[in-house]
Image: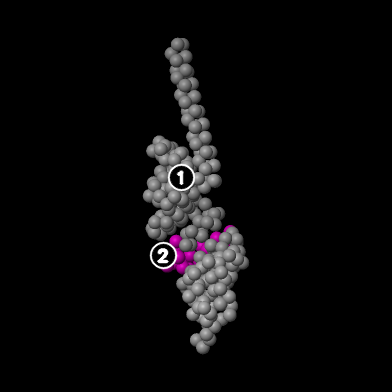
Amino acid sequence: MKTNVIQCSQLLSWLLVLISCQKADEQLTVKAREMLKRQEYSNVIALLAPRRKSLQNAEVLNMLGYAYMETHQIDSAIACFNQAIKIDNQNYKYFYNRGNAFWQIGMPEEALKDFNRALELNANVYQIYLNRGATLAALGRHQEAIADFSRAAEMNNNDRNIFYNRAQSYIALKDLDKALTDLQKCITLSPDYARAYYMLGLILYAKLPPQSKNNPQACEYLQKAIDLGMPEARDLFYEKCGQY
């Protein structure tokens, strides 16, 4: 009987420790998430990095990795995402974030693998299609990239990045009319998007017949890009529009 009492007491102590640890993990998760919402990335790192080796919560590791990525500490970010995936390989966010990290350090092939895996786990997030499309475009696979951008556009018709990136792939494939349509969509969504105005001006000049020297609409686009603070447009404006 005495032995049973001791065993029950030990079990109770173990359960109390477990509950205490779980509560501490929950508090840590909540605190880190609040910091991320406020974009306090350095504070997230200061909070979580000292505990990194002992962390067993994949979501917390993912948050730490994201904070590292936002502060351009990509190797540390990838290490955290690796650790999170080792604990839980069924959450698309960990693969998506690691793919973005690989993209940032110029490893598109590795990024592509992670975006593919993220889409296998969740095909309902337009950002994955957008970022995979950008990766495919960087690899010169523009038809596939356009398919991804188009899928992203079906899911979210209000993100200018989808249309700007798809326009770049259309330009690469010399389909300038479709590129124009996408860039015009960009400036409809974001009237202050200087780079879209610049690209519109470039395309309109590229479409000019050989005997033509000017295009007033192109000049308007280039002037708008200049007004919005894009100095690259100035040289082309001076050359094509004849104004200094």
Image vertical order of residue 117 relative to residue 237, above or below: above
Would you say residue 89 is visible in this rendering?
no
Residue at horizontal 49%, vertical 69%? 231
**Quick one: which residue is furthest to the right in this view?**
188
Q: Residues within 10 Å of mark 2 (few under 14, many from 20)?
A: few
- Please state which amino acid type lies under the numbered disc 1: Ser
Coordinates of residue 106 in the picture (x, y in percent)? 39, 59
Nearest to the observer: residue 196 or residue 139:
196
Magenta highlight on residue 154: yes
Kindly identify which numbered label has been placed on residue 42. 1
Q: In the rendered structure, does residue 84 fall within the stretch colored magenta?
A: no
Q: How far from the left and from the top, in percent, is residue 202?
A: 51, 75
The residue where tag 2 is placed is 139
Dominant SS type (magenta): helix
Label 2 amino acid? Leu
Query: Alpha carbon of mark 1 to alpha carbon of mark 2: how far?
Result: 33 Å
Q: Which residues are magenta?
A: 135-155
The structure residue drawn at horizontal position 53% and vertical position 66%, both measured from the top left corner, is 229
Q: Residue furthest bottom?
A: 211
Q: Nearer the viewer, residue 236 or 129?
A: 236
Q: Mark 1 Cα within 10 Å, few/some/many (few <14, many 20+)?
A: some
- Image coords of residue 132 (percent x, y): 47, 59
**Which type of secondary structure does the marked residue at label 1 adopt?**
helix
Furthest toward the top, the residue is 2
Task: Work out whether residue 17 or residue 12 is closer to the camera in this orientation and state it.
Answer: 17
| Residue occupying image coordinates x 54% and y 57% | 126
